[in-house]
Amino acid sequence: MGQKLWQLYKYLKMNINDLQNPESLNIYINTFSKPFTIFFESMLTLILENKIAESNQKWSLKNKSLKEFDS
């Protein structure tokens, strides 16, 4: 993991301009390595799924309609 982070650091240093002044959100995101973006995308998806499950549990206790996860 440390080796991957070091390689990412080197890669980001070479592409600093795309991070500081991206022309679009896609260019900004693509500046990061694929494993890095997959890790954070997966983490944020898991957080969202847990939040929706928690919310649905509370809503079901109040007999209200449940939310769905749109991926």
Image: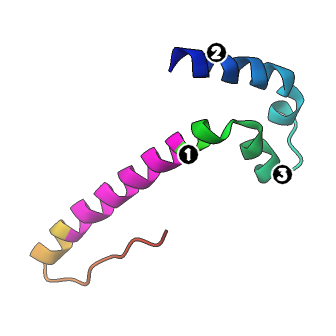
| Image color mode | rainbow
Who comes first in sequence, dot 2 or dot 3?
Answer: 2
Q: Residue at x 76, y 25 (%)?
A: 12
Q: Mark 1 points at which residue?
A: 38
User: In the rendered view, does 14 fall on the left or right side of 66?
Assistant: right
Residue 65 in the image: above or below residue 6: below
Label annotation for residue 24: 3
Who comes first in sequence, dot 2 or dot 1?
Answer: 2
Q: Mark 2 points at which residue?
A: 6
**Contact, mark 2 vs mark 3 (Cβ under 8 Å):** no
The local secondary structure at tag 3 comes to loop
Who comes first in sequence, dot 1 or dot 3?
Answer: 3
Please state the horizontal and vertical placement of residue 7, each as a whole percent of the image.
68, 19
- Which residue occupies the extreme left position in the image? 61
User: In the rendered view, does 48 fall on the left or right side of 13?
Assistant: left
Q: Which residue is drawn at 46% across and 73% down?
A: 70
The local secondary structure at tag 2 comes to helix
Under mark 2, the amino acid is Trp
Quadrant hosting residue 54:
bottom left
Please state the horizontal and vertical placement of residue 27, each as a whole percent of the image.
82, 47
Q: Distance between the residues labelled 2 and 1?
A: 17 Å
Q: Residue at x 33, y 76 (%)?
A: 67
Residue 57 in the image: above or below residue 2: below
In this rendered view, identify the residue nearer to me: 1 or 20.
1
Mark 3, residues whose alpha carbon is within 10 Å: few (<14), some, or many (≥20)?
few
Q: Which region of the structure is painted magenta?
A: 39-56
Q: Residue at x 59, y 38 (%)?
A: 35
